[in-house]
Image: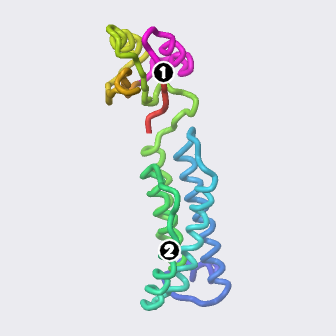
Amino acid sequence: MPEWLGASLSNGQASAPSLLAWRIGAALVLGVAVSGIYRWARRGQLVQTTFLTTLVLLAVAIAMATQVIGDNVARAFSLVGALSVVRFRTVVKDTQDTAFVILAVVVGMAAGANNLAVALVGLGIVGVASCFLWPHRQGGDWRATDCVLTIRVALTPGAQAVAEQAVAAVVSRSSLVSAGTARQGVSLDLVYRIRLRPGLAPAQVVADLNSLEGVESVELRRAD
């Protein structure tokens, strides 16, 4: 193993520009690996390209910050104060995304602290775990996906019963999540969590339900 590579894998301090470039470059590669694992874990789903870029740049930024701080406690507090003005303006919708943000921070810190072994072993374990923790989801297949169905029916005799019978005919399972009045009490909103029967197209289901007498509107979307 080359001497410079062996030094970078050890847990010591170094100030040579070549070693600093290696550590920050390693953070870049590790960030790309984190981004790749995240993209693979989210296969079949819509993923924001900007979030993938954020994971890569975050690993590099943390590696640089770790090099700047070193063992200086005063510098660490100063850097935390300077970075406190930076905030995430976009709310992370899924806790899985938050986990990958933390993973990018950790691998960047490991690269900056000259402890690549931790980052490499951790990435390997996360990559293997992704095979079991985040199963493949088909983007165009709604059969294995829970959906939220919202039906607005008129408050007329029999309208709710007709809607419920129609829903039961197109789902393999369903549960009523909420019910409430709308349009100043002249309509009723029924919200179901459902699983569509195999072979049914979502658009056709919406069209069929909307054609029922007493049904005013229908909305079908994937559950969060």
**Whole-Å distance between the Cαs marked 1 and 2?**
52 Å
Query: Residue at left 52%, top 72%?
Result: 86
Residue 130 at x, y percent in the picture: 47, 48
Query: Residue at left 50%, top 86%?
Result: 69
Residue linked to disc 1: 217
Q: Is the residue marked by circle 1 packed among few (<14), some (14-19), or many (20+) residues within 10 Å?
A: some
Front position among marks 1 and 2: 1
Residue in front for this viewpoint, 69 or 213: 213
Name the secondary structure under disc 1. Answer: strand
The answer to whether residue 98 is above or below residue 109 is above
Residue in front for this viewpoint, 130 or 221: 221
Q: Amino acid at mark 2?
A: Met
Q: Is residue 141 magenta?
A: no
Q: Amino acid at mark 1?
A: Ser
Q: Name the image quarter holding the C terminus.
A: top left
Range of residues picked out in magenta: 195-216
Residue 223 at x, y percent in the picture: 44, 35
Specify the quadrant of the image occupied by residue 26.
bottom right
In the rendered structure, the answer to whether residue 115 lies left or right of residue 16 reads left
Q: Is the residue marked by circle 2 packed among few (<14), some (14-19), or many (20+) residues within 10 Å?
A: many
Q: Which mark is residue 80?
A: none
Q: Which mark is residue 109?
A: 2
Query: Residue at left 57%, top 83%?
Result: 7
Name the secondary structure under disc 2. Answer: helix
Query: Residue at left 56%, top 68%?
Result: 59
The answer to whether residue 73 is above or below residue 94 is below
